Image (cartoon, rainbow, N blue to C red):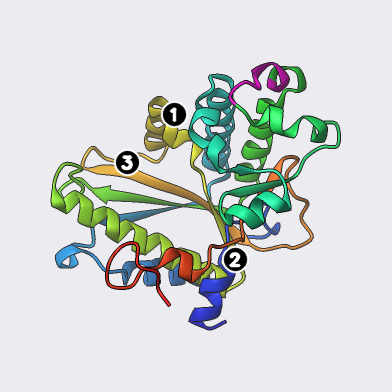
Amino acid sequence: MDLIESIIKRKTTNTAFADRKVKKEDIELLIKTASHSPSHFNSQPWRFIIVQDKEKINEIGKIAGDSMVQLMDDGRFWKQYRKYFRFSKEEINKTKDGIHIDHLPSFLKPFAKKIFSESGGKVISLFKVSRILGNDEEKLVNTSPMLFCIALNKDEYKPNELSGFYSVISLGAVIQTLWLVTTSIGMGMQFISTPGEIPEKWNQLSSILKIPNTYELMAVFRMGYIDDKKKRPAIDWKSSQRKSIYELSFSNEFGINWK
């Protein structure tokens, strides 16, 4: 797969991966290509932790699942993300952004908009939606053959200084590289994001990974080979739609449409 094709086909893998280990040469390819990402003054502030130990993966999966439940039950999930939810093709065609929640258990479909709203707490509790999502999250992590974790050197990652800004740009380049390389070799990846929204949960991940005080854990991804036969999670969504380049771009100054 060439570069342009990888960019266009890149997507987050919401389903489980194939039931096989990731080849050593593919892991080394991911590390090598990530290491060639640009960084401020070639500081290379990132360090990569490849987790294949099943016990550690299961520990992280449990934390991820519990984090999802907590975020939903205390209302934070809805307050932060409700604006991104779309429930029909009409909504998607109109906004061309967000996530289209197109896959729900049949008993939940009549209540979709109510569930995914700030006022949907009673419905969520009644149908145990938070536990459905939490269980799916835990299972997806637990069945992943590997996790790819990224930490930044605190000598560079200083959030209130320019070096911190530059190191985050550099981190983004690493992540994009990983996404393109996984796409090109038939692998997928997904950000394990929920623990990052709860400081004590993120600290637990850092402890499991034995991140030293001189580094900050920044991102954890689950990775594996794509298997198109794997079933989608009970509650799932798509997000392949994109705004047109003319809506996203301006000519010479903001507000003058690119033509």
- 179 falls in the magenta region: no
Residue 95: give x, y in percent of width and height.
Answer: 58, 53
* Residue 70 relative to residue 105: left or right: left
Q: Nearer the viewer, residue 49 or 129?
A: 129
Q: Earlier in the sequence, mark 1 or mark 2?
A: 2
* Residue 151 relative to residue 118: left or right: left
> Mark 3 falls on what kind of element?
loop
Give the extent of the magenta segment: 118-124
Look at the image and tell me whether residue 238 can be seen: no
- Cβ–Cβ under 8 Å for marks 1 and 2: no
Query: Residue 201, which numbered label?
Result: 1
> What's the CA distance linking mark 1 and mark 2?
27 Å
Q: Which residue is mark 3?
A: 211
Above or below residue 13? Residue 124 is above
Q: As shown in the figure, which amino acid type bears the numbered disc 1?
A: Lys
Q: Residues within 10 Å of mark 1 (few under 14, many from 20)?
A: some
Q: Which residue is mark 2?
A: 187
Q: Earlier in the sequence, mark 3 or mark 1?
A: 1
Residue sitting at the far bottom: 2
